[in-house]
Amino acid sequence: MRIVLRHHPSYQITDISDEDAAALKRWYANEADDEDDAAALAVIRTAAARDGWIECDCIDGPVRPLMYPRRDEHVYTLVRMTRAADDPQARFDRPSHAENCPFFSEKTFEGSATDKKFMLRPMPPKPTAYFDPLPALAENIADRSRKPPSTNSGRSDRPSALGIQLWRLLHAARQNVVAPLQLRPETTASITSHLRDLRLAARNFNVVRTTSLARLLSTWPADFFDARSRWQRNIQSVPNWPASARPTGFMIIAAKLITDSKIYPLALPGFIEVVSRVRRPLRGDLKSCGPYLVLVNFDRGDDDDSPLRPVQAYAQPVHALDTMIPVESDFERDVLNLLLWAQLVFLKAAPRIEIRITKPLFALSTADGYCRPDFILDISVDGRHRRRLIIEALGFDTPEYEGQKAVTLPRMKLIGPLFEIHPPDLVDAMSLKTGRRLTGWIIDQS
């Protein structure tokens, strides 16, 4: 067995001795003693620290099964990167393990569970001023005798933990609110001004008790490549990291493109490669959801003197890089374009009517429970608030999604009148008719 470079398995980092390989297999088969556990942990930690995958030697040939190290809670484990039998999307470079290998798992292809289910999990804002740093590095190896907890692999509108932190910062900076055109300054907002607003909002959060998020946050991607940058020196100088955490840096990147593990910043010609998969909302076509606002966590691995490395990232699609309004799909982006058009129509035809657009990131509480509308319109006439209207972008038509919406839509109607928009409403032949229907509805509700 050997450790190979992540994403480039043809490049060898180091060999794994026969003794350590045998210990790794005994650990995975739940037949290991304490000495085997220690040897297996050393192999997995080496692979993690050197950004590698572990290649199994159970089959011969130039292409062999792969596994990657993962930290769960405070333990290390290995995850097989093997394809399921009869999977039509099987990757040629990830063959299954041999049947007599401890890492072998017999599975049949059943299609992606994320295409079958969708769960709406509205979440209220977290009442804290703390931003979570990365947890302390794992010091133990997983107990293979314990069964892992069952997980639900269906789609959900709730982001990862890092995504929730980005939402909190966007919410604090009011990046999810579009002011009425009548109240906006004449100067045009830019990427620079939006990033400045995020840095200002970061002053209201602490990462550790005496260190604000603003001190550990950069919005300039070049800081990652400059060990002498003020941002990197700030991370190094924080003296009071708790035992449960490790020194963590944060960076917000305006990105034109992301892949599974690479971020292409607008301000750099190259890319930043993340150790883990870049997370993003599970709505719509993930290949065409850009541009993005990306929050990245950095650490120095096992050695405090090592260069910073990007550990994890969450990419939030935004309407455009000069607006930075969060959206969760291309369809939501189209709906937001319609709402921005309606703002302009009323500015020209009925300037007394002001429309404030809000993209809720967290759930709102109603008498019947939580819900999270796609968009909220606050309508004011002559400067006096009159109505709150709900806009729902209903982009799915699966029974599960419609069943979830059957629960949340009545709750939304407790907040205000509801206007539904479906994908056919925004095709070329229908978009003008939908726009007229929307503006007429706003007038009727005002």
Image: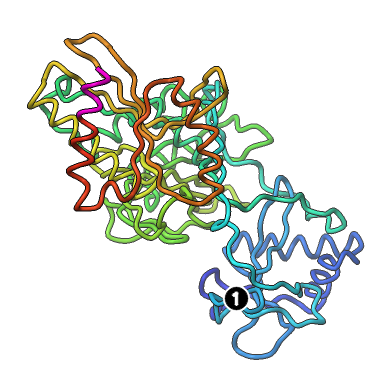
Q: Is residue 10 above or below residue 248?
A: below
Q: Residue at x 74, y 62 (%)?
A: 42
The overriding secondary structure of the stretch rendered in magenta is helix
Quarter of the picture holding the C terminus: top left
Seen in the image, is 2 located left or right of residue 148?
left
Residue 210 x %, y %: 53, 22
Residue 268 x %, y %: 28, 55
**Which image quadrant is residue 244 in?**
top right
The one of 126 and 440 positioned closer to us in this rendering: 440
Q: Residue at x 81, y 74 (%)?
A: 102
Q: Residue furthest bottom?
A: 61
Tell me, yes or no, if residue 114 can be seen here.
yes
Total marks placed:
1
Q: Is residue 189 above or below residue 270?
A: above
Q: Is residue 151 above or below residue 120?
A: below
Q: Amino acid at mark 1?
A: Asp
Q: Residue at x 35, y 53 (%)?
A: 289
The one of 156 and 8 positioned closer to us in this rendering: 156
Seen in the image, is 328 located left or right of residue 367?
left
Label 1 packing within 10 angstroms: few (<14), some (14-19), many (20+): few
The one of 339 and 439 positioned closer to us in this rendering: 439
Residue 154 part of the magenta-drawn span:
no
**Which image quadrant is residue 218 in?**
top left
Q: Which residue is mark 1?
A: 87
Residue stretch rendered in magenta on the structure:
440-446
**Which image quadrant is residue 437 in?**
top left
Q: Residue at x 55, y 17 (%)?
A: 367
Quarter of the picture holding the N terminus: bottom right
Q: Is residue 326 above or below residue 154?
A: above
Tell me, yes or no, if residue 222 can be seen here.
no
- What secondary structure is marked by label 1? loop
